[in-house]
Image (spheres, rainbow, N blue to C red):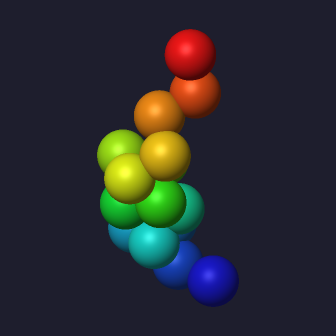
Amino acid sequence: MSTIEQIIRNLRQPKR
């Protein structure tokens, strides 16, 4: 998996 994909997933599911 690419690092960019992880960043995008984090933006789509922000951890609060």
Q: Is residue 2 above or below residue 10?
A: below
Q: Quadrant of the N terminus?
A: bottom right
Q: Residue at x 38, y 53 (%)?
A: 12
Residue projecting furthest to the right: 1
For the image shown, how many numbered marks are present on the structure?
Answer: 0
**Residue 16 in sight in this render:** yes
Q: Residue at x 53, y 78 (%)?
A: 2
Residue 6 image offset from top left, x and y in percent:
53, 62
Residue projecting furthest to the top: 16
* 15 or 6, nearer to the observer: 15
* Left or right relative to 16: residue 12: left
Q: Is residue 11 above or below residue 14?
A: below
Q: Residue at x 47, y 34 (%)?
A: 14
* Left or right relative to 5: residue 16: right
* Left or right relative to 16: residue 14: left
Q: Residue at x 49, y 46 (%)?
A: 13
**Residue 7 in sight in this render:** no
Residue 16 image offset from top left, x and y in percent:
56, 16
Residue 7 image offset from top left, x and y in percent:
43, 54
Q: Is residue 3 above or below residue 13?
A: below
* Left or right relative to 8: residue 10: right
